[in-house]
Image: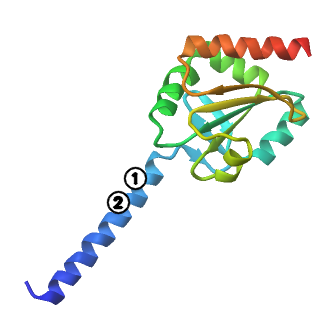
Amino acid sequence: MTPTNKLISFITIGTILIFLGIFWENSNSHSDGEFISLGKVTFYTSLDPGVKEAVNQSKPIFLYFRSETCYWCIKFEEEALSDKRIVEILNNNFVLISIDTFKQKNVSANLNVRTTPYMIFFTQNGEEISRIPGYLPADEFLVKLNEVLEKRKLS
C-alpha cells in the first residue's frame, strides 16, 4: 500500500467514525428541542421557559441535573421517573426542568451542583425548598417527594 493510499484509507475511516459518532449521539438523545422525555416524564430543557411556566401555573419547580452518560441518572430515570406514583405527583404538582451538566455547565456551577444525578426543588418564586444529591431508589425518592409537598403546604 502506497503512502497516498494509506492516507486516503485513514481519512475515509476517520470520516466514517465521525459520522457514526454523530449518528450514535443523535439516536441516543431523547431530546426534542425545548423538551426531553426521561422515563415517563417530560421536562423542559432550559430554565427560562420552565420558570415562566412555574410562575404562570403557580407551581414549584423540580430541577433535575443529569448527563446522558451517568449510570445512576439512567437508573433513576428507568426506576423512579417511570414509577406511576412518582410520575403522577411530579406531573400534577411541579414544573419539571432537566439540566444536562455537560451542556449547561453554567447552570450547574451557579447552583453548586458537582455530581449527577442531583435534584433541587424550588418555589415558583425561586426560593429553594430542598436538595437531593445523588441517586435514590424509587421508594426513597417518593418519600422525599412527599416531604417536599408537605413543606410547601406548611409555607
As drawn, the residue found furthest toward the left would be 1
Q: Check disc 2 and report the residue beneath it.
A: 20
Name the residue nearer the viewer: 47 or 120: 120
Q: Quadrant location of residue 124?
A: top right
Give the residue displayed 59% in from the left and 12% down from the top.
140
Give the residue displayed 84% in from the left and 34% down from the top.
54
Colouring mode (rainbow / by chain / secondary structure / one colour): rainbow
State how many labels appear.
2
Q: Amino acid at mark 2?
A: Leu
Location of the C terminus (image quadrant)? top right
Q: Position of residue 18 (x, y in %)?
A: 36, 66
Q: Position of residue 24 (x, y in %)?
A: 40, 53
Q: Check disc 1 and report the residue beneath it.
A: 24
Name the residue nearer the viewer: 111 or 38: 111
Q: Residues within 10 Å of mark 2 (few under 14, many from 20)?
A: few
Name the residue nearer the viewer: 97 or 37: 97
Q: Are marks 2 and 1 in contact (CB under 8 Å)?
A: yes
Q: Position of residue 127 (x, y in %)?
A: 86, 31
Q: Position of residue 139 (x, y in %)?
A: 57, 11
